[in-house]
Amino acid sequence: MTPPERSLRAHLTRTESLNAVYEGTLIEETGRAEVTIGVTDRRLLGRSADGEFLDVKQEYITSIRSHLHSSPTFRGVDDRLVAGVGAILAVIAVIALVLTVLRLPAAEGMATVGLAVATVAGGSAAELARRRYVRVREALGRLERDRGFDFDLGSDRDRLVLGGLGGGLLAAVSFLWLLAATGPLAGLLVLATVGGLALAEYGVRLETEYEGIEFATEREKRVEITTVDGRTVELRTEPDASLERELGCRSTRHHYDSIESVQYDAP
């Protein structure tokens, strides 16, 4: 017996039997909740992980309607799209920065360009040193587990630490100087350039991690149950679930006359 089925059985009476169990979603005005749905010989039950409970007596059901719903979806990440967006962002930021510099006096414009280049170069150097440092540290860790040590790798690690700190310091000082000299606009454009380059580089790395975008069609069965008091219970289940058939057959047995309607898609 699965845990969801066990949670439903805890709400049964002694003479009540659980005939079918489904996983689905309960749709309400306040939101939706993932529920375990059970059909007994007397009721429709539903219980969510956070304790929300659904209880509908079958003799109160007046209609059951269901239909299959399909919606397009996609999975994965397209590396070309990510790289392209990053490259476009970087190009736009550079063009905007150039236009900003052209409006400045010659000396101030040259200083702005120099500080912007120093910020980007220092940040890039610090990031490259960080990545290389991570790989070197992992290699040294494997050697230490094998009770060995590579002095060349140890020296590389120390140089990478110094290089990363130097690049980060250069980027920070240049960026702060740029803000003080030209104001926030140039600083924002430099940040946009760095962000675009980082996004483009991430897109290039995605090429080896993902297979691109995969388009698919998601299908679900939507079941609407109306009760004598005008209440409508909307449930969504897997497309092959037979909730409406199971519930329709058993609800009809509780009525002297047939319930108003039981409509569902043909198999």
Image (cartoon, rainbow, N blue to C red):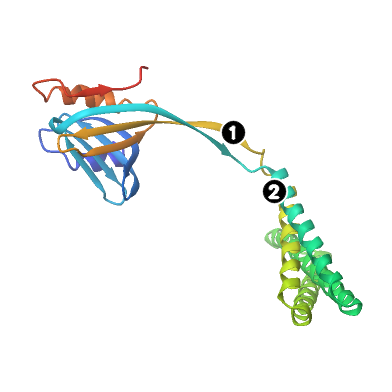
**Residue 139 drawn above or below residue 17:** below
Q: What's the amino acid at mark 2?
A: Val
Q: Say which element carries label 2.
A: helix
Residue occupying the point 63% across, 38% down: 213
Label number found at residue 197: none
- Would you say residue 165 is visible in this rendering? yes
Q: Quadrant of residue 227?
A: top left
Where does the image place residue 95, in percent across and percent down from the top left? 81, 61
The residue closer to the viewer here, 47 or 82, is 82
Q: Say which element carries label 1.
A: strand
In the image, 46: left or right of 123?
left
In the rendered image, which residue does mark 1 sit on?
215
**Residue 55 drawn above or below residue 174:** above
Name the residue at the front extreme.
Answer: 103
Q: What's the amino acid at mark 1?
A: Phe
In the image, 101: left or right of 66?
right
In the rendered image, which residue does mark 2 sit on?
82
- Marks 1 and 2 in Cβ contact (< 8 Å): no
Name the residue at the right extreme.
Answer: 106
Residue occupying the point 24% across, 38% down: 232
Q: Quadrant of residue 38?
A: top left
Where does the image place residue 177, in percent across and percent down from the top left? 78, 81
Position of the N terminus by quadrant: top left
- The residues bearing labels 1 and 2 have C-alpha atoms spaced at a distance of 17 Å
Density class for disc 1 (Cα within 10 Å; few <14, some 14-19, many ≥20) is few
The residue closer to the viewer here, 185 or 248, is 185
**Going from the N terminus, do you reach mark 1 or mark 2 first?**
2
Q: Quadrant of residue 97?
A: bottom right
Density class for disc 2 (Cα within 10 Å; few <14, some 14-19, many ≥20) is some
Where does the image place residue 249, in percent across and percent down from the top left? 21, 21
Position of the C terminus by quadrant: top left
